[in-house]
């Protein structure tokens, strides 16, 4: 039995519930035979991947849904072996080169050249080109992106690229100027509730509006999250009635809130040590450090005095950046917490805040 | 020779001209076709006449015709027959580590070119000078080691091989290499010549555009001809695919180029206490929560923080009524945020921080 997210994922462009204009645009592009390279960008859970798969189906028909997973081995110039998981059908190939970190350039060079230099053999195929989907394109290194540049122009007749990213800021300008930029905005609350009601109808029950409201509030535009929460809620309380519907928050989120609260309760070296233990626990459960820091900062900002809010955001941004550049994440989260404690204590004992820097 | 894939010659691997990117289709065929860059073209024309070529280093912002110029020059020098055997083009998509420099480039550089007939298959006569040309495109992404390995090769085989390095940032080319080349700077294209080129392409392709679309494209491209041509082609694709085909509108150009609509920017400026016309107006600002909601909206709608920042800068800095001190603080905040984004900081946090600092600056008396 699959999750609702997968079960009710739209398969064709006609099934999509929102961004109708975008769907019709994609449909006409797929039909025109002159398909450009595309860069899809937007927040997570907005439906980028769903749209990509729908477009592919529009291009090639149901054959694209016959997927197989391969493990490919690439060899770097320094003779290191890299294993990369590749999902492919007869018509397209999907990979996440950023999985191999700084060696992503090798993967890009090898796989694109291979695809680009072979022609489509299936005579029944609707299109002459193959499609390469690159996930997390904004996590590609500069080198890997530079390697894409000429390839994109040179091998246009055998291959099209579809890049999928959260933001275009980290994509270098030459790539951006070679792609059709497609923005997939997160659905509005109305659109989300439409989707939720659609799923409820398919599952043959009615979704009461307070429950719907609380799902929307907790998922803030992330449709995947909303559907997962929805299903979890249904499992817990099959009738979904009553005003006291509690959205089950993920454990780590509650844990982060607890951390934030304990920072505000007491500011001492001992407390910092306690918090450190908790942060370690979060990190060892594979919660991304950026998410931890952001969640803590959000909670802190909700609780403190107005004058302190910009300070907390400033230090969160400052240490988050350092965390990306450094290698050991815990140092920077700790530094952030220590800084917040200082600022908070100073403000409460002496009633002033120091300038930045 | 899998990595040395020559440009598809006509007839061989011919692309349906309808599907070809216009950037490739309308690449200048001779150096006289190159838009603006009069100085460079004049020097190269001399070189073409005397068939003597120095080592060259082309640098300048993207889309100014660096690659086009050298390819056109090579084609004029050698003609279609010799092009494959005399020209080696390597770019960042090819492996260019130190081993490739030592093996492939060196092997190619030391072969003595074969003597050739002067009349080419297409009936024209080409100078076909007795040397080969190695084009290293996007040379600024070569490693330092690979660049140093080139030094001696360039000198030893200078009798039979010329190098042309093409890059965006001349500072990333190590000094010893740069001093061995004659440098050509490519300036961002002037409005006039880009306009002529775009109009020519639009005419040749039968583009149907509303009034003011072509100037808008040029404005958004900012001197980058490739960007302008790509915008035009993408827009044409979108609009000719609809039933019935519609003329290109300025809205779709905005959408294609990823420019953030004005109302999003206006809202951000307002919550920071800035009015687009009259300057500082603190009554518009709605405190910390206002900024936070506005920034969250930007993230939710999927706009890229870098682009938003650029547009805030363009709207805020020219306002005459904001005092210099406030303006400098705001500029500093924007600059730091941009640095943060470049280094991979979290978009939402960085943008939020920047907006809060600008807001604080505006509240200063």
Image: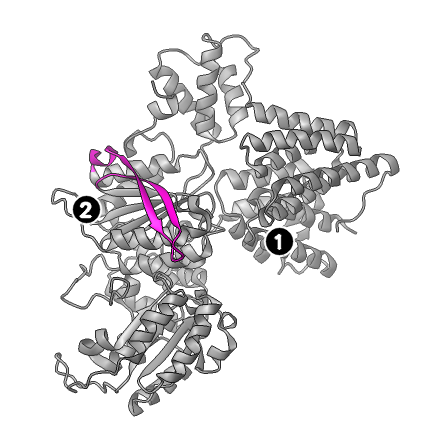
Residue A127 numbered mark, or none: 2
Q: Quadrant of residue A7?
A: top left
Give the image location of residue A92, x and y in percent. Answer: 26, 43
Q: Is residue B73 visible?
A: no
Give the image location of residue A121, x and y in percent. Answer: 14, 47
Which element is circle 1 on? loop
Query: What residue does disc 1 label?
Result: B277
Q: Chain of mark 1?
A: B
**For the point 42% across and 80% down, which residue is it?**
B152
Q: Are marks 1 and 2 on the same chain?
A: no
Q: Quadrant of residue A248?
A: top right
Q: Is residue B318 left or right of residue A75?
A: right
What whole-number distance in Å separates the C-alpha atoms at marks 1 and 2? 52 Å
Q: Nearer the viewer, residue B320 or A159?
A: A159
Q: How is the image coloured?
A: one colour
Q: Is residue B227 left or right of residue A318?
A: left
Residue A80 belongs to the span the image colors magenta: yes
Q: Quadrant of residue B48?
A: bottom left
Residue A137 belongs to the span the image colors magenta: no
Give the image location of residue B182, x and y in percent. Answer: 44, 83
Location of residue A189 with respect to A19 vertically, above or below? above
Location of residue A281 with respect to B24 vertically, above or below? above
């Amino acid at each position: 039995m699959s999750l609702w997210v997968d079960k009710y994922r739209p398969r064709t462009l006609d099934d999509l519930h929102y961004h109708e204009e975008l769907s019709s645009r994609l449909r006409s592009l797929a039909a025109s035979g002159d398909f450009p390279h595309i860069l899809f960008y937007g927040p997570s859970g907005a439906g980028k991947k769903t749209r990509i798969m729908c477009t592919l189906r529009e291009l090639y028909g149901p054959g694209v849904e016959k997927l197989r997973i391969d493990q490919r081995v690439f060899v770097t110039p320094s003779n290191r072996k890299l294993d990369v998981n590749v999902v492919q059908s007869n018509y397209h190939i999907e990979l996440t080169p950023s999985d191999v970190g700084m060696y992503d350039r090798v993967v890009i060079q090898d796989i694109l050249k291979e695809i680009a230099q072979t022609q489509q053999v299936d005579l029944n195929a609707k299109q002459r080109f193959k499609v390469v989907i690159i996930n997390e394109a904004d996590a590609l290194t500069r080198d890997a992106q530079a390697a894409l540049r000429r390839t994109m122009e040179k091998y246009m007749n055998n291959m099209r690229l579809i890049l999928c990213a959260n933001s275009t800021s980290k994509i270098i300008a030459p790539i951006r100027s070679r792609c059709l930029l497609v923005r997939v905005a997160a659905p509005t609350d109305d659109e989300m509730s439409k989707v939720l009601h659609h799923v409820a109808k398919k599952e043959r029950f009615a979704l009461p509006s307070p429950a719907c409201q609380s799902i929307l509030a907790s998922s803030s535009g992330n449709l995947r999250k909303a559907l997962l929460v929805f299903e979890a809620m249904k499992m817990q309380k099959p009738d979904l009635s009553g005003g006291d519907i509690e959205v089950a928050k993920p454990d780590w989120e509650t844990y982060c809130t607890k951390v934030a609260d304990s920072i505000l309760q007491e500011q001492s070296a001992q407390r910092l040590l306690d918090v450190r233990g908790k942060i370690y626990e979060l990190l060892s459960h594979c919660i991304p450090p950026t998410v931890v820091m952001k969640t803590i900062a959000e909670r802190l900002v909700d609780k403190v005095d107005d004058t302190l809010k910009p300070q907390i955001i400033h230090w969160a941004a400052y240490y988050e950046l350092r965390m990306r550049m450094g290698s050991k994440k815990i140092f920077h989260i700790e530094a952030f917490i220590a800084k917040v404690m200082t600022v908070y204590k100073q403000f409460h004992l002496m009633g002033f805040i120091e300038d930045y820097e | 020779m899998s990595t040395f894939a020559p440009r598809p010659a006509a007839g061989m691997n011919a692309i349906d001209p309808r599907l070809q990117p216009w950037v490739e289709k309308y690449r200048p065929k001779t150096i006289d076709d190159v838009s603006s860059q009069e100085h460079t073209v004049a020097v190269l024309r001399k070189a073409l006449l005397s068939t003597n070529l120095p080592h060259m280093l082309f640098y300048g912002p993207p889309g100014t015709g660096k690659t086009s110029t050298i390819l056109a020059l090579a084609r004029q020098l050698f003609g279609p027959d010799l092009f494959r055997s005399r020209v080696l083009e390597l770019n960042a998509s090819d492996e260019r580590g130190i081993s490739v420099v030592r093996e492939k480039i060196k092997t190619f550089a030391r072969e003595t070119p074969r003597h050739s007939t002067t009349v080419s298959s297409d009936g024209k006569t080409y100078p076909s000078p007795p040397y080969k040309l190695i084009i290293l495109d996007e040379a600024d992404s070569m490693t330092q080691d690979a660049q140093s390995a080139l030094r001696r090769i360039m000198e030893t085989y200078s009798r039979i091989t010329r190098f042309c390095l093409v890059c965006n940032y001349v500072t990333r080319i190590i000094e010893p290499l740069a001093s061995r080349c004659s440098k050509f700077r490519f300036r961002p294209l002037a409005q006039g010549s880009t306009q002529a080129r775009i109009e020519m392409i639009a005419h040749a392709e039968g583009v149907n555009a509303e009034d003011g679309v072509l100037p808008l494209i040029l404005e958004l491209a900012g001197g980058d001809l490739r960007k302008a041509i790509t915008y035009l082609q993408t827009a044409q694709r979108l609009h000719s695919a609809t039933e019935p085909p519609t003329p290109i509108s300025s809205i779709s150009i905005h959408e294609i180029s990823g420019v953030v609509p004005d109302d999003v920017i206006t809202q951000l400026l307002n919550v920071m206490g800035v009015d687009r016309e009259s300057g500082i107006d603190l009554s518009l600002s709605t405190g910390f929560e206002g900024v936070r909601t506005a920034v969250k909206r930007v993230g939710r709608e999927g706009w890229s923080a870098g682009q938003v920042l650029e547009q805030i800068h363009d709207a805020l800095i020219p306002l005459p009524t904001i005092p210099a001190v406030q303006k400098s603080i705001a500029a500093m905040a924007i600059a730091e945020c941009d640095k943060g984004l470049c280094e991979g900081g979290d978009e939402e946090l960085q943008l939020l921080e920047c907006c809060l600092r600008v807001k604080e600056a505006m509240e200063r008396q």
